[in-house]
Image: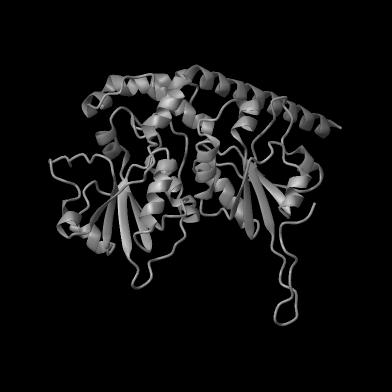
Amino acid sequence: MASKRNQNEAGDSGRKKKKQIRVWVDGCFDMAHFGHANAIRQAKEMGDYLIVGVHSDAEITKNKGPPVYNEEERYKMVRAIKWVDQVVEDAPYVTTLETLEEYDCDFCVHGDDITTTADGTDTYYLVKANGKYKECKRTAGVSTTDLVGRMLLVTKQHHERDEEKLLDKEKVADIGKMSADNKCSTAKSPYTGVSQFLPTSNKIIQFADGKSPNPGDKIVYVAGAFDLFHVGFVDFLEKVSKEGDFIIVGLHTDPVVNRYKGSNFPIMNLHERVLSVLACRYVNEVVIGAPYAVTSDLMDHFKVDLVCHGATPIMDDVDGSDPFAEPKRRGKFKTIASNNDMTTQKIIERIISHRLHYEARNKKKEEKELKIMQAHMERIGKENKS
């Protein structure tokens, strides 16, 4: 099959250019979270040009059940990850040598977890057998299965907007009990339900590009929860990025988000939301634990030229004041419509509407992976004895 990359050409000096290392990654990327982004980041570090294949709804449904996001949403989410150079739609579920050849990729990268077809076949057995497979470290504490579990956890208690009720001892005890019922290790907070992700400063540094605004750059600031980072946020931030040169996103703390979202929102804790936003190609910097009100100190400190907010209702601050009063006073406030009706609540509603299916899917996946892991350990044991 003909290569889709032109042959290397000689440089001006007559010497051949260094061969570009092209890397292939594929997957479902359902609810494309920061764990997916971290795998993509690690894969990009192994080469120069990263191609990401995304499976179709039909392929995913056949092998593991229908995804939460449809294929168009998943294609858009992966394109928004800043380490991705190219997206291949409707990529085959089993990675073949022909696919690597078609896109002139040197090897395929996948996390050190297990991916199988409906009949239990390793989806990477072909590239593994031909030495075209490399592994990256899976991000512990997060997966699509885990996030679905958290959303299912949300449906097991009433959605109350009364913060005092949410934080009373019975509520916290209920969350702990639900964690045990769902076989999750710990309930880290009454806001995020169950989160096993352990953040480090190094992980944040890896996701951040470390660049500062250039002199004369127009700096734009937006703030919010950005919970379960989804296509609505991608469309919003893409539009915001056209308003300036350097985009700063302020992320509210879990208690602040809980005040205006209610129930046990946010689904993802602050550090998880930080990584999700940092992985977006339209974002340059993140303020961790940003104040709810955009103050004059904040605007002066970051030299903010424009403050943007989505076309959604804005709750007053705790004292009843408008949290955007200062940028409005300065004439530096603008409402940006994403023209996408996706919300965090709608994602949860998708899960709720198919709750029994997703519970069964999660259980089936866990059982399948356990059997494969046990077989793998037995094989290693036999090899060690021989």
How far across and how far down the image is residue 111, in percent? 63, 42
Q: Splitting the image into 4 quarters, where does residue 28 fall?
A: top right
Q: Splitting the image into 4 quarters, where does residue 124 fall?
A: top right
**In which quadrant will I find the C terminus?**
top right
- Vertical side of 340 occupied by 192: above or below: above
Q: Could you tell me which residue is drawn at 72 percent across and 57 percent down?
A: 4
Side of 174 relative to 143 (left or right): left
How far across and how far down the image is residue 303, in percent? 27, 64
- Vertical side of 163 occupied by 82: above or below: below
How far across and how far down the image is residue 19, in percent? 72, 66
- Vertical side of 309 occupied by 347: above or below: above
Q: Could you tell me which residue is drawn at 66 percent across and 27 percent down?
A: 63
Q: Could you tell me which residue is drawn at 27 percent across and 40 percent down?
A: 312
Residue sitting nearer the eye, 118 or 164: 118
How far across and how far down the image is residue 257, in percent? 29, 38
Side of 40 relative to 315 (left or right): right
- Is there any visible trace of residue 253 in the rendered image? yes
Residue sitting nearer the eye, 161 or 80: 80
Residue sitting nearer the eye, 68 or 318: 68
- Vertical side of 347 occupied by 357: above or below: above
Q: Could you tell me which residue is drawn at 47 percent across and 31 percent down?
A: 147
Q: Residue furthest front?
A: 339
Total marks shown come to 0
Q: How is the image coloured?
A: one colour
- Is there any visible trace of residue 187 in the rendered image? no
Side of 60 relative to 153 (left or right): right
Q: Residue furthest bottom?
A: 13
